[in-house]
Amino acid sequence: MSNLDAIFAPRSVAVVGASTTPGKVGHDIFVNILRGGYTGTLYPVNPSARSVASVRAYPSIADIPDPVDLGMIILPPPLALKAVQQAVECGVKGIVIVSAGFREVGPEGRQIEDQIVDVCSQAGVRVVGPNCLGVINPLPAIRLNASFSARMPAAGNISFISQSGALCTAVLDFAADREFGFSKFISIGNKADVDELDLLRYLHKDPDTEVIMLYLEELRRGPEFIATVKEITSGDFRPKPVLVIKSGRTSAGAQAAASHTGALAGTEGVYDAIFQQSGIIRVDTIDELFDFASAFAYKNESELGKLRRKVPSGNQVAIVTNAGGPGIVATDMTVSSGLELAKFSEETVEVLASHLPQTANLHNPVDVIGDAASDRYENALAAVIRDQNVDGALVILTPQSMTNVLGTAEAIVRIARRSNKPILCCFMGIIDVSAGVKYLQEHGVPVFRFPENAAKAFGALYKYSQWLNRQHLAQFKLTHAERKAAKLIESYLTQGKNYLGELEGLELLSCYGFKTLATGLAVDVDQAVELAKKIGFPVVMKIVSPQIIHKSDADGVRVGIETQDEVRQAFEHIIAAARAFNPEAEIKGVLVQQMAPGGVELIMGMNRYPVFGPLLMFGIGGVFVEVFQDVVFRLAPIGRNEARRMIRSIRGYRLLQEFRGRPRTDLPTLEKLMVSLSDMVSNHPEIAELDINPLLVHEEGQGATVADCRIILKPHEG
């Protein structure tokens, strides 16, 4: 028995703090286990009661004559600590602490919580909670409802992890209404010991779990979480989809930062990066969570008797409906979910024509007309699902007086057993379609009340299919001047330079393969002219001041300067404009820089977060970065494949391809630079924030040039 098996599948449970008073948590949890049909042995522990719910009570866990696998602790913190110490001495293998009053209330509670974890850690005992709802295993072999939810959910193949106990009870109620079954159901509370990552690892190996749902408030592990969950969602051993709903998506979590990356990212940027990199599918609502889970649990029995997960190999969908309106809704939602309507082959159209009336629509979406009997549905669905251009189907049924709902459901199941393509259903209504809905659910075919739900679920299936079947390119073999960069950073910090402008920043970036421009700092007009002559015209001139971060805002940039006279005029104008913009600003001088060749303006950046580490940013740059906010984030380190996905996921990716006579940009160089940036910020923890904006990417084969940058350094602690 593993240490988490003792929590989810214990042979015996002691409820320490079992109460004789109905309504108290200690009473209700004990009764929930008892009435839930728990298949093991149950012991109430209460020093002042002879029995609880007619079951003999024991004064302490030490008085129980037999071995105990799981200890449920429902006591205030000081008594809970003593009970845990005693339980560990008695050989209890797992502990769930339901009661509150620990870390969440202050230092004293946290100290007791830490003591409990230390005691259990030394004994190899895992702890769930404190401050949690408990754990539920509805499977017939266990039937454990060790929670203060009176509702024992149906058994199923979906597991649910939640940081919120209050949400758990609502989810259980919601699941009961939808006849939705679970394999494991757990509230983790304060996560003093067992956290979501421990549970994800456990459920990955659990043969009774096919889909994992997660309600998340915050993570305490970053890179380790990504590496582990990536293996769960797409590794060689039993890949399983993980669906997450996270609170706080709309909170203004962006940090006040000197970099665009810090200003645009916020904590939601971090979480989106984690979910993208690990293959987690994020949902927006509880409704969506259940809809998607139903689709992902679609692993029905084939004619060969084998169970298989139904995921589409592409995004070409066929719609079969007996009503035009819902078909149009499904079509709209299909397109907005990243799917396309499949174009049928001539043979498929001929087959449809032979089975359907003249008034039927033979092209996608297929309208079998309102008076369709089950055989018409069966013939139409069988024809489209066999088409090589079709990756899956949505079947929509609205109940008419002549509709055989159950017969249609039976036909759909017959076809589903013969096909390895997903078939999702929408039986609209409640009472009139209930028999068909029940039959589909019993045979593992996902069924939804509205066409938009079915289309969104199909879109999620396709997204997961893309993740499972993604290509893996060979990693770049890059050489960096890591030692030179480390010495530069050390010298800057020694000089007290925490803010690096272009001069120092370009020198640092060049150590990691970034192409930079000839640049010099002029403190007076004559020096500016000499620098321009040395660099060669045309040049760019920019204000240099630690207090003026966004140079364009201060009218501190001049481009395309062709002559010495223009250099003099530009110098005077830039200095005057800077002083007018911020009279208190320290003016270091004016940068004179080689004019970069033309290209698409992009931004690369990084902001370092506690726990998670460096968060990388890529997107459309220049002065429009804050207007369009067309950026994506990933946690470093990343390799070539993640860099490619990053670049291709921005809305403006089309600008980087061949477009209306404009040549394709140098995408391979962009990928290399993204990996180089990841390497740089991973190798040098002193880099706290960084912006390369703009990075000008040129046409294919011509590389990319850093036109401007800024870097914030902080001495590394540790």
Image (cartoon, helix red, strand yellow):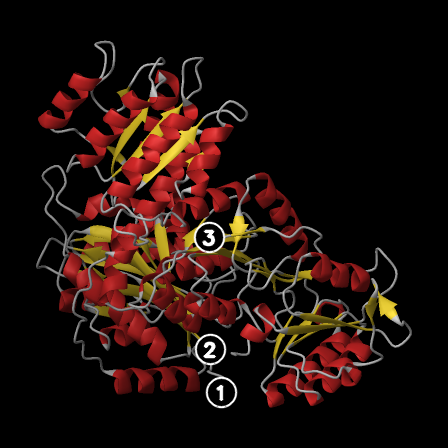
At x 15%, y 67%, the residue is 535
Number of the label disc, if any, that sits on residue 714: 2
Quarter of the figure with residue 406: top left
Q: 571 or 48: which is nearer to us? A: 48
Task: Read off the residue under disc 3.
Answer: 580
| Real-space CA distance between mark 2 and mark 1, rounded to the nearest whole angstrom | 12 Å
Q: Which residue is mark 1?
A: 718
Name the element at disc 1.
loop
In the picture, measured across the screen, residue 717 lies left or right of residue 646, that is right
Give neighbour class at mark 3: few <14, some 14-19, many 20+ (Cα, 10 Å).
few
Residue 336 in picture, x, y percent from top left: 34, 34
How far apart marks 3 and 1 lie (CA) works out to 43 Å
Asked where in the image residue 186 lies, by quadrant, the reply is bottom right
Q: Position of residue 390 (x, y in %)?
A: 20, 36
Could one spot residue 213 in this view of the protein? no
For badge 2, the amino acid type reads Lys
The answer to whether the residues at label 3 and label 1 have Cβ atoms under 8 Å apart is no
Residue in front for this viewpoint, 66 or 381: 66
Amino acid tagged 1: Gly
